[in-house]
């Protein structure tokens, strides 16, 4: 007999958090997911800007290791210009690889300066530049504004790689959470529009599926920094009434793609205690199904955003080392 019970009725208890991460969540008051609605977005943006100031150019330069500049480049046709934050290795002579960074924030929060610490750590290990794109945020700017901004910035990076001392054959698109979903979507756009060619895609706990109905989405309800209710708010901001319906574009929600062939090699990682676990695993499986390359890591007990919550935890260090190993092998660095 076919099981027609809803996913919520078919899942067991959530996997336990890693002890170090559980302690960090408790200390920060994040053991349960904060309430998030569209009405709260403006106030939460203001509060975040006040409590977590963006890193300065001096901080991003890391004592002169990087030259930090910004460029305003043409955006999508008929849309505003896009700002790129560029961190180039100061001592590099030959053209370097580049990580094209897309920040997270549930499609509703964040700037080009957010979440750069871990990406710069990785870049430094492989001698790469980091280029971080500022994209328009939902709900004020729904799909396709965010992904088209990100794609426009990538095209500009590839077209002007020589000016930036970047090797155009070694550009990796990277992002975490919403940024991971946008990175996957940009890789699809680049394939379908004939470029730019990408060396790889680094997807950290990517936000891929607007249907929000995986077992892990139900299993982790109310736990950690991002859960099913928060995810519904983020997808509604991006897609409005189309969320979860039959006509959602794979360039908005890459899990909707029916053909994942011809994509650059992917690195996908996620925690076992992250609501994005099952959609990340399914995306890696779909890449393999269609003949592509994907390296998948599911970190035991890791929650959403674990590397920012507890950067010195053992599981965080293991995740960083695995990402570095993949990049080094991919780029020949």
Image: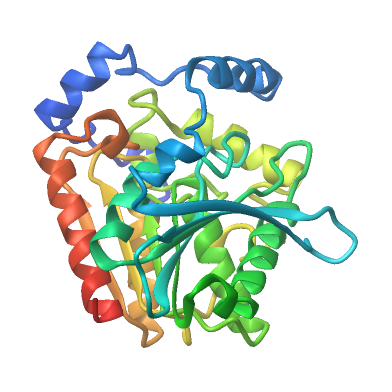
Depth check: give the residue in front, 116 or 242.
116
Q: Is residue 264 visible?
A: yes
Depth check: give the residue in front, 88 or 317.
88
Tell whether 107 sits left or right of 104: right
Q: Give the tally of numbered discs.
A: 0
Residue 199 image offset from top left, x and y in percent: 42, 79
Residue 88 image offset from top left, x and y in percent: 45, 61
Tell whether 63 sits left or right of 42: left
Depth check: give the residue in front, 306 or 92.
92
| Residue sitting at x 41%, y 21% | 33
Q: Residue furthest right?
A: 78
Residue 32 image offset from top left, x and y in percent: 35, 18
| Residue sitting at x 58%, y 67% | 186
Determine the image quadrant of residue 36.
top right
Q: Which quadrant, please, contains the N terminus?
A: bottom left
| Residue sitting at x 64%, y 79% | 159
Considering only vertical position in the picture, is 34 above or below 214? above
Tell whether 13 sits left or right of 70: left
Determine the image quadrant of residue 26.
top left
Q: Which quadrant, please, contains the C terminus?
A: bottom left
| Residue sitting at x 78%, y 63% | 74
Applied colour scheme: rainbow
Residue 189 image offset from top left, x and y in percent: 63, 74
Considering only vertical position in the picture, is 271 above or below 73? above
Tell whether 111 sits left or right of 26: right
């Amino acid at each position: 007999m076919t099981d027609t019970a809803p996913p919520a009725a078919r899942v067991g208890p959530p996997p336990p958090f890693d002890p170090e991460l559980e302690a960090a969540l408790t200390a920060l008051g994040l053991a349960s997911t904060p309430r998030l609605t569209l009405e709260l977005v403006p106030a939460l943006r203001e509060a975040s800007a006040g409590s977590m100031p963006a890193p300065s150019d001096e901080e991003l330069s890391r004592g002169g290791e990087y030259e930090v500049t910004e460029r305003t480049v043409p955006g999508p046709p008929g849309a505003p210009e896009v700002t790129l934050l560029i961190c180039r290795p100061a001592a590099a002579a030959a053209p370097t690889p580049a990580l094209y960074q897309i920040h997270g924030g549930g499609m509703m929060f964040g700037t080009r300066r957010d979440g750069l610490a871990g990406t710069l750590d990785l870049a430094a290990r492989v001698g790469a530049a980091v280029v971080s794109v500022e994209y328009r945020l939902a709900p004020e700017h729904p799909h396709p504004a965010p992904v088209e901004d990100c794609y426009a910035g990538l095209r500009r990076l590839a077209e002007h790689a020589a000016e930036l001392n970047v090797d155009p054959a070694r550009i990796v698109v990277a992002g975490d959470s919403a940024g991971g979903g946008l990175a996957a979507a940009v890789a699809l756009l680049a394939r379908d529009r004939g470029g730019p060619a990408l060396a790889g895609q680094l997807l950290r706990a990517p936000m891929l599926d607007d249907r929000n109905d995986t077992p892990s989405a139900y299993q982790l309800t109310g736990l950690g920094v991002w859960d099913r209710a928060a995810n519904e708010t983020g997808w509604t901001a991006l897609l409005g009434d189309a969320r979860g319906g039959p006509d959602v574009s794979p360039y908005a929600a890459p899990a909707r793609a029916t053909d994942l062939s011809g994509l650059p090699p992917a690195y996908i990682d996620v925690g076992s205690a992250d609501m994005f676990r099952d959609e990340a695993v399914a995306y890696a499986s779909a890449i393999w199904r269609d003949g592509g390359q994907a390296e998948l890591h599911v970190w035991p007990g890791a929650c959403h955003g674990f590397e920012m919550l507890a950067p010195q935890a053992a599981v965080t260090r293991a995740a960083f080392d695995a990402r570095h190993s993949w990049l080094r092998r991919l780029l020949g660095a």
